[in-house]
């Protein structure tokens, strides 16, 4: 495993982190039992993963993760949770964090994020909740404070860009992948300049690894004028990324996500042991060939689109990554 510093926090974090949200939610979607979840988390530790991300909104993920980490030395892993501002009022941030700590069976987290910081509510959320979380930080309930964007709607990463310009947070979480790498334009450089840790989410989306969904997404972007007709093929639009040593789009996605020096860790949301091991191999593999990576940036950075699920369900064994 490779380790990088999480910005100015001085925390050393594994380049692959384990997320407990998304479609799998630490195995909840697959009906994993407590013993299986513990085995999965412990195997992640054995693979060198020391970064764990969760949130109150991820079903029972906080409790499952807390139970799985019982007995593991607290200073051997980095633990992060979130606070959702939606339908919350003054005082809710501290109460949410205290509830998370009980479920996680610990007296502190390393990072607590604003969960889904978005441009329209930015001022009100910062004014209401940042002082609460700063007080919780002074009380030792969290070591650092971060902001996770609302990837589904903030296609241009406006909230994170503003937060970085104002230098409010120690860590930011951004959606970043093969076909939505717009954060490379402003967010990544600003974070690196301010020594803010960058956590990548959504590195592998079901759309990217499911051929019919990928093809439809590219067609929609072309029809909308966001992507030139000749930018990528209509069929198998990303097969040109594959080649010697690049085995799959999931493999390419993790390697691309970790490419920027601004990135500290890339989250995987899988609950499949084989996929977890494959993802570790991908994250520590060499970067994509320079011309391939450059073409991805040149093609998709200007698009400014998030990769969103459609109404049909993904198919195939690669969907769980």
Image (tube, helix red, strand yellow):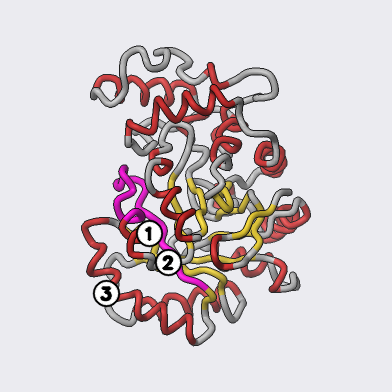
For the residue pair 51 and 296, the one nearer the viewer reads as 296
Quarter of the rendering containing residue 163: bottom left
For the residue pair 25 and 180, the one nearer the viewer reads as 180
Which residue is farthest front?
A: 193
User: Height in image: 26 above or below 56?
Assistant: above
Residue at 72% across, 41% down: 277
Q: Residues within 10 Å of mark 3 (few under 14, many from 20)?
A: few
For the residue pair 38 and 196, the one nearer the viewer reads as 196
> Percent position (x, y) of residue 306?
36, 39
Magenta residues? 144-161
The tag earlier along the polypeptide, 2 or 1, is: 1
Residue at 48% across, 30% down: 208
Residue at 23% across, 69% down: 124
The tag earlier along the polypeptide, 2 or 3, is: 3
Q: Residues within 10 Å of mark 2 (few under 14, many from 20)?
A: many
Q: Are marks 2 and 1 in contact (CB under 8 Å)?
A: yes
Per the image, label 1 sits on a secondary structure element best described as helix
Which residue is farthest bottom?
A: 139
4 relative to 199 in the view: left or right: right
């Amino acid at each position: 495993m490779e380790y990088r510093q999480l910005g100015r926090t001085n925390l050393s974090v594994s380049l692959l982190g384990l997320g407990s949200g998304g479609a799998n939610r630490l195995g909840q979607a697959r009906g994993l039992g407590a013993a299986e979840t513990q085995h999965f988390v412990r195997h992640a530790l054995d693979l060198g993963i020391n970064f764990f991300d969760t949130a109150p909104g991820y079903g029972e993920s906080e409790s499952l993760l807390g139970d799985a980490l019982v007995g593991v030395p607290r200073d051997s892993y980095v633990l992060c949770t979130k606070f959702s501002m939606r339908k919350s009022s003054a005082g809710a941030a501290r109460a949410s964090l205290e509830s998370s700590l009980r479920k996680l069976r610990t007296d502190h987290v390393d990072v607590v994020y604003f969960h889904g910081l978005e441009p329209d509510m930015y001022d009100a959320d910062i004014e209401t909740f940042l002082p609460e979380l700063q007080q919780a930080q002074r009380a030792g309930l969290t070591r650092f404070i971060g902001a996770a964007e609302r990837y589904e709607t903030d296609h241009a990463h406006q909230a994170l860009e503003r937060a970085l310009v104002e230098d409010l947070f120690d860590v930011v979480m951004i959606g970043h992948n093969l076909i939505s790498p717009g954060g490379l334009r402003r967010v990544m450089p600003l974070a690196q300049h301010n020594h803010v840790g960058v956590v990548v989410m959504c590195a592998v989306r079901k759309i990217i690894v499911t051929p019919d969904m990928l093809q439809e997404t590219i067609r929609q972007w072309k029809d909308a004028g966001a992507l030139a007709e000749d930018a990528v093929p209509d069929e198998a639009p990303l097969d040109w990324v594959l080649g010697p040593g690049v085995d799959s789009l999931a493999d390419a996605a993790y390697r691309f996500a970790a490419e920027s020096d601004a990135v500290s860790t890339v989250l995987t949301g899988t609950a499949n042991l084989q996929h977890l091991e494959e993802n570790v191999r991908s994250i520590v593999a060499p970067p994509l060939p320079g011309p391939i990576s450059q073409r991805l940036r040149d093609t998709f950075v200007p698009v400014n689109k998030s990769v969103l699920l459609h109404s049909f369900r993904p198919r195939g064994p690669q969907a769980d990554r």
